[in-house]
Image (spheres, helix red, strand yellow):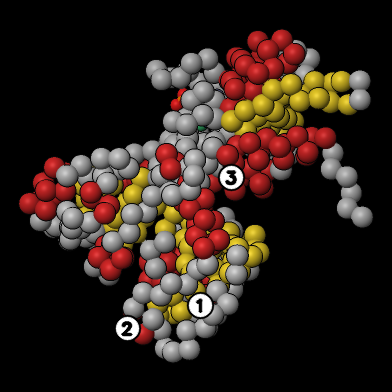
Amino acid sequence: MAEAESDDVAFMRRALALGARGLGQTWPNPSVGAVVVRPGPDGPVVVGEGHTQPGGRPHGEAMAFEQAGALAAGGTLYVTLEPCSHRTVRGGTPCVERTMRAGVARVVSAIADPNPMIAGLGHAILRTAGIEVVTGVLAAEALRSHRGHILRVTQGRPMVTFKVARTADGYAGGPGGTRLAISSPEAGDWVHRLRASHDAIMLGIGTVLADDPLLTVRLPGLEIRSPVRVVLDSRLRLPLASKLVRGAQDVPVWVIAAEDAPVAAEIALVAAGCEVMRVGRGPDGQLDLRAALELLALRGITRVFSEGGPTIGEQLALAGLADEVIVTTSPQALGAQGVVAVRPGLAALLADPDIYAPAESGLVGRDSFQQFTRIV
Ligand code: AOF
Ligand code: ZN
């Protein structure tokens, strides 16, 4: 029989689940979950909970304390990231101050916030105020949940999830690159939810020219959660008549081009409501992917979802930029020579236990999926 979880682990798990609800909505901030608990006659009782709100404020702790009111006094705050200690032009009261004012006796925090403005100061201030501070509870889970924020503040790039769908015999496309309808409808909904948990969706111009995708989140109630759509388009070939450009006023379209792309195309795309940014080319002549991601991080993006196809997936992975990799497999085989979904470079990395660890796996509709997380 599995050992019962301690209260600390159970409440932190609840805080992580709350934080996960905001993923994709809070950039440039992390999505932090917070739970306030006080002792009751039959054990601890939740008196307030919350998570970082869309756009990044109010912070998770502020939501939880707001709900708890006076009941927080003497209780415990569970929080998935070190409470902030900084004051900014945009910010209100630092969460450490709220915590002290609420009169909690104990703070259980999963991990420190590597943001140099905080970086241990939040925990230190709380301890100095006489509050007991416990850290490291479900740290691995919190590191994964806050990976986008952590990479942005420590490495100046967002985290990247790469997803590819394949047939039972391993193909993402038909002979000569023809488009295949691989995933079941259930997997379609699941992909929309995955998209919604990221700040931006990134794809290559090849896919746009072939499929004219819309790339919004089309699930009831989640439509407003459509991430920014980023197109890697070195020569600025994105058609003004594409669905992406036609919807650019409603859901942002950011186009990343090479420095030598035609200015006239940039002017036309900007007039149509897109934003155009430029990066250099790598040694292979392709857009410098790391530089492109750095541009996104500068604009506040912490989590990028790439459905860009086998080539970009392999490039991202070889450059050490594919933090999460999701492979879905349908029960049907193509039965011909198609476009290999998991290219050899990516396959080798996924099979290397020092580089990727298997994470979630399961079924979505008729399809199976496997998720791998890059070991840091
Ligand atoms: C928390 N709770 O819910 C979040 C935190 O721009 P500001 O003033 O909102 O501060 C953002 C920084 O605060 C962000 O970069 C990250 O270090 C931390 N985020 N902290 O205590 C929260 N979202
Ligand atoms: Zn805060």
Name the one closer to the observer, 348 or 230.
230
User: For the point 58% across and 69% down, which residue is it?
Assistant: 367
Q: CA distance from mark 1 to mark 2?
A: 16 Å
Please name the amino acid that badge 2 sits on: Gly
Q: Residues within 10 Å of mark 3 (few under 14, many from 20)?
A: many
According to the picture, the residue beneath numbered tag 1 turns out to be 167
**Count of number-bearing discs:** 3
Tell me whether the residue at label 1 lies in contact with that at label 2, contact meaning CB atoms closer than 8 angstroms: no
Residue 145 bears which disc, if any?
3
Of the two numbered discs 1 and 2 on the same chain, state the one appearing first in sequence. 1
Residue 176 bears which disc, if any?
2
Residue 272 picture quarter: top left
Q: CA distance from mark 3 to mark 2?
A: 38 Å
Q: Position of residue 12 (x, y in %)?
A: 72, 36
Compared with 359, 41 (above or below) is: above
Ligand 1: does it lie within 8 Å of the C-beta at label 2? no
Please name the amino acid that badge 3 sits on: Ser
User: For the point 54% across and 30% down, which residue is it?
Assistant: 52
User: For the point 33% across and 54% down, which residue is it?
Assistant: 214
Compared with 117, 146 (above or below) is: below
Secondary structure found at label 2: helix
Residue 353 visible in this rendered orientation of the protein: yes
Q: Nearer the viewer, mark 3 or mark 1?
A: 1
Please name the amino acid that badge 1 sits on: Thr
Ligand 1: does it lie within 8 Å of the C-beta at label 1? no
Tell whether 318 sits left or right of 62: left
Compared with 271, 284 (above or below) is: below
Secondary structure found at label 1: loop
- Location of the N terminus by quadrant is bottom right
User: For the point 13% across and 42% down, which residue is it?
Assistant: 271
Residue 330 picture quarter: bottom right
